[in-house]
Amino acid sequence: MQCICRRVFKQNKNYNRTITTSVPDIRIYEVGPRDGLQNETKFVPTEVKIELIHKLASAGLKNIESASFVSPKWIKQMSDGVHVMTNIKKIPDVNYPVLVPNLKGYDIAKKCNVEEIAIFPAGSEAFSQKNLNCSVKEGLNRFRAVAEQAVKDGLRVRGYVSCVVGCPYEGPISPTAIAKVTEEVLSMGCYEVSLGDTIGVGTAGSVRRLMKEVLQVAKPENLALHFHDTYGQGLSNLLAGLEFGIKTVDSSISGLGGCPYARGASGNLATEDLVYFLYGLGVNTNVDLVKLVEAGRYISNFLAKPTESKVNRALGDRFSNHLDVVKIAACKT
């Protein structure tokens, strides 16, 4: 078996893009404070959310999705977005993006002096109706207005596409349909589109089929991977995606996450597990895993629930220097 860190080219006769198993520098996009917490029934106070964000930044994460400006009527957990964004102590080189559903939400976010927003069209008709109360086409039109205004105002815009492999209401989703939505989102001015396996049914095989189709309309550097770990396939799906040159991965501290409109969806790929995985590949993440474990334990203790990160469970309190963990992950003496 070829080592993933060695550059190996494979040419698929049915696909005209060269696939590589080399591992690029990976950009970690932390979604815990927003996507990770939005489905929690226990309300997380503003000060706890802020402290979590501070701990994640202290661990070395550079992209931390911090709030959402959806209606409190639908997601009460995110009702304090303004207070979160106006009270966090921002570090100059850290990005604190927020999720916005429409122009009203965008106007509120803009008043908080955010630099990046995220929009979230759906990849399936049924999920779009449940999550956005409109068709996929109508959702795209709604988000286009938001994206174009944000770009005009000088903000960065990121797009999420949900249910890229399977939908809780429709079942399997066509990769061609996801490619079309991705192309639309990029045309709005989004610098990046995050492909989300919202219910975590994907496998390495289905991810490869998806990537082959989406890469007909997008470059690897404009895509991110967002895997829920419902069936324990998060890391294997990630490895399949990295073969295509993807350089951005979404993850959530302590494996938190879920979606109120996707029954059966468990948490996201845990950030601790992702960082340990990348350590083993020799990728320098510049993230202190010991501090990251502390952040995961902090929010898990508040929620009174065990961490979903296997790495967090395994490491416990045994290490004080993250370089010792790097040696373990890389099997180095």
Image: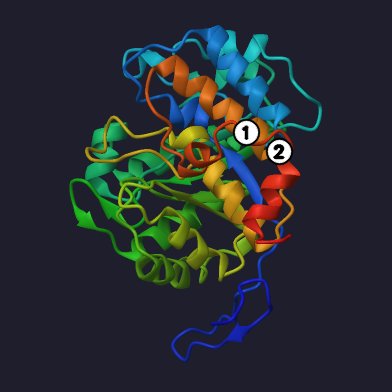
* Circle 1 residue: 292
35 left or right of 148 in image: left
Q: Residue at x 54, y 16 (%)?
A: 49
Residue 245 sits in quarter: bottom right
Residue 130 sits in quarter: top left
Residue 255 against residue 115 in the figure, above or below: below
Label 1 neighbour load within 10 Å: few <14, some 14-19, many 20+: many
Q: Which label number is shown at residue 54? A: none
Q: Residue furthest bottom?
A: 13
Q: Are marks 2 and 1 in contact (CB under 8 Å)?
A: yes
Position in image of residue 155 (x %, y %): 68, 33
Residue 128 against residue 249 in the figure, above or below: above
Label 2: which secondary element: loop
Name the colouring of the figure.
Answer: rainbow
Label 1: which secondary element: helix
Position in image of residue 18 (x %, y %): 59, 81
Q: Residue at x 58, y 13 (%)?
A: 84
Q: Amino acid at mark 1?
A: Leu
Residue 331 sits in quarter: bottom right
Label 2 neighbour load within 10 Å: few <14, some 14-19, many 20+: many
Q: Amino acid at mark 2?
A: Asp
Q: Residue at x 72, y 46 (%)?
A: 324
Front residue of 322/272: it is: 322
Q: How many marks?
A: 2
* Circle 2 residue: 288
Q: Is residue 99 visible?
A: no
Q: Residue at x 61, y 52 (%)?
A: 248
Distance Cα–Cα, label 2 vs label 1: 6 Å
Front residue of 63/254: it is: 254
23 left or right of 31 in image: right
